[in-house]
Image (spheres, rainbow, N blue to C red):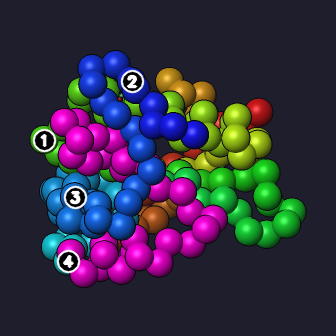
Amino acid sequence: MDGTSAPSEIFIRAVEPEDYEALRDIYAQPRACRWTLQMPLPSAALWRDRLAHLDPNRRLLVACLDQHPVGNIGLVLEANPRRRHAASLGMGVHDAYAGRGVGRALMAAAIDLADNWLGVRRLELTVFADNGRAVGLYRSCGFDVEGRLRRFAMRDGVLADALTMARVR
Ligand SMILES: CC(C)(COP(=O)(O)OP(=O)(O)OC[C@H]1O[C@@H](n2cnc3c(N)ncnc32)[C@H](O)[C@@H]1OP(=O)(O)O)[C@@H](O)C(=O)NCCC(=O)NCCS
C-alpha cells in the first residue's frame, strides 16, 4: 500500500529504521508517555533496537508533517491460529502536535490496513480509563468499551484503571 494522504498535509507511511530518534522523541513527551505504557526517558538505543528487530506480525506506521514523523500507530497481529482474525493497536502523537488530526489520520490508515488488506475482524486496544481524548477518538472510529481493568498499570505513583475496547466486524 502506498502512503496515504490525509487532510492538512499529514502523510502516513510505514516506519523506517532511521525513524528511531523521531519515535524516541514522540514517546519521551510527558503526555505521550503518561497515557501509554512507555517508560519515561527512553533512550535512542532502545528505539533503534526496536525498529531494527521488528516482529513481522507488528506493523508500525508513522504520520509525518513536513516529512518528519510526529505520530505513530502499531498494529500487532495475533500469532495464535485461532486468533488470527484479531489484532491489537497502540498509538501516540508528539505532545506538540496533538489535536491537529494526526491521531485520526493514523487510526484511519490502521483501520484500512486491518479491514481491507489483512482481513482483521476484531481490533482491540487498552486505554487508561481517564484518557478522554483517546477514548473519544476510539469511540468515533467504531470501538466499544468491553470492560474495565482495575489497577491496570503504574502511572505517576498510582495504579490506574484501564478500559478494554474493541471494534468488531
Ligand atoms: C490520543 C491521541 C492519539 C489522539 O491523537 P490526536 O492527534 O491528538 O487527535 P486528533 O486531533 O486526530 O483528534 C481525534 C479525536 O480525538 C478527540 N479529541 C481530540 N482532542 C481532544 C480533546 N482535547 N479532548 C477530548 N477529545 C479530543 C476527538 O474525538 C477528536 O475527534 P475530531 O476529529 O472529531 O475532533 C494523542 O493525543 C496522543 O497520542 N495522546 C497521548 C498518548 C495517548 O493517549 N495514546 C493513546 C493510548 S491508548
SS at mark 3? helix
Give the residue at x 29% y 65%: 18
* Quarter where residue 135 is shown: top left
Q: Nearer the viewer, residue 78 or 124?
A: 78
The label number, if any, that marks residue 96 in the structure image:
1
Task: Work out whether mark 3 precedes mark 2 in sequence or the reverse, and give the earlier one.
Answer: 2
Q: What residue type is labelled 4?
A: Ser
Q: Which amino acid does label 3 sit on?
A: Ala
Q: Mark 3 points at which residue?
A: 22
Q: x, y percentage for residue 79?
A: 74, 68
Q: Name the residue under label 2.
A: 6
Q: Nearer the viewer, residue 120 or 1?
A: 1
The range drawn in magenta is 44-73
| Vertical comparison of 20 with 140: above or below | below
| Residue 77 is inside the magenta segment | no
Q: Nearer the viewer, residue 62 or 33?
A: 62
Q: x, y percentage for residue 68?
A: 21, 46
Q: Nearer the viewer, residue 140 or 61?
A: 61
- Quarter of the rendering occupied by the N terminus: top right
| Vertical comparison of 128 with 80: above or below | above
Q: x, y percentage for residue 139?
A: 52, 29
Give the residue at x 21% y 75%: 44
**Circle 2 or circle 4, nearest the eye:** 2
How far apart, in angstroms, are the residues tagged by discs 3 and 2? 20 Å
Q: Name the residue under label 4.
A: 43
How far apart, in angstroms, are the residues tagged by discs 1 and 4? 20 Å
Mark 3 near mark 2, Cβ–Cβ under 8 Å?
no
Q: What residue type is labelled 2?
A: Ala
- Quarter of the rendering occupied by the C terminus: top right
Mark 3 near mark 4, Cβ–Cβ under 8 Å?
no
The label number, if any, that marks residue 163 in the structure image:
none
